[in-house]
Image: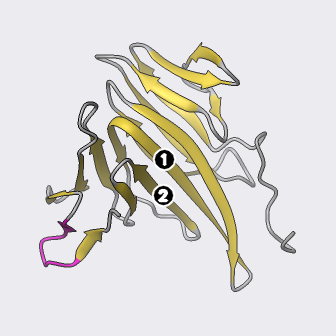
Amino acid sequence: ETPGLAIFDAQTPLAVVAQASGQVVVLRNGVTVVLSAGDSLYLGYVISTDTGSQVKLNFVSVEDSTQVLSSSTVSEGARVTLNGELTQVNRIDSFQIKLMVGQGSVAVDQVTVANFSVQVQTPAGQVQVPRSGLTVTVDQTSGETAVSRANNGVNANANAAEDGAGRPLARLN
């Protein structure tokens, strides 16, 4: 165990439902439960949205679940597994949310808190979300992944994700 590292386990909330519309469910310990605003989400939960549904999640600090670090919107027809990782680099705690998107679209909002990051994993690979935010869409049938940056409308396919200046936006392996 790393000295000073915050406690993080399956009973630590990773996110809280800020808003839910339509049919949004989570698979908890093998049981499907309908989500509503205020529900806490934990490690390994699988979130599913039906047609015409979406859910906004507030990612919270593992040390203080009332502190919102960032947010994400899971669009209709999506299936997303919530994971996280707590690390320590140079004696500084860092927390990373890992969203495993099997299908559908996830938009991650701007991250303004230091020592917090979001990674999106898809069948095509993974992408570290830049501080400005990112949208990742996985086609339900083909698994094809599209990545676009928040706020500037730059789109890229999963194999050549770049920003407007040709710098890599995502490397999906």
Mark 2 touching mark 1, by CB under 8 A?
A: yes
Q: Quadrant of the N terminus?
A: bottom right
Q: Quadrant of the C terminus?
A: bottom left
Q: Secondary structure at mark 2?
A: strand
Q: Is residue 82 above or below residue 34?
A: below
Determine whether, in the image, residue 58 is placed left or right of residue 89.
left
At horizontal 33% and vertical 62% (from top left) the residue drawn is 172
Sort mark 2 into few (<14), some (14-19) or many (20+) by Cα contacts within 10 Å: many
Which SS does the magenta portion mostly show? loop
Q: Which residue is mark 1?
A: 99
Look at label 2 and name its amino acid: Val
Q: CA distance from mark 2 to mark 1?
A: 8 Å
Label count reads 2
Closer to the camera, 21 or 127? 127
Start-end of magenta stretch: 160-167
Closer to the camera, 96 or 100? 100
Q: Quadrant of residue 107?
A: top left
Q: Earlier in the sequence, mark 2 or mark 1?
A: 1
At horizontal 47% and vertical 45% (from top left) the residue drawn is 100
Viewer-nearest of labels 2 and 1?
Answer: 1
Sort mark 1 into few (<14), some (14-19) or many (20+) by Cα contacts within 10 Å: many
At horizontal 19% and vertical 70% (from top left) the residue drawn is 162
At horizontal 40% and vertical 58% (from top left) the residue drawn is 126
Q: Which residue is mark 2?
A: 118
Q: Is residue 172 above or below residue 14?
A: below
Residue 16 coordinates in the image, percent (x, y): 59, 35
- Please tell me whether residue 100 belongs to the stretch shown in magenta: no
Look at label 1 and name its amino acid: Leu
Q: Secondary structure at mark 1?
A: strand
Q: Which mark is residue 27?
A: none
Residue 127 coordinates in the image, percent (x, y): 38, 61
Determine whether, in the image, residue 66 is placed left or right of residue 117.
right
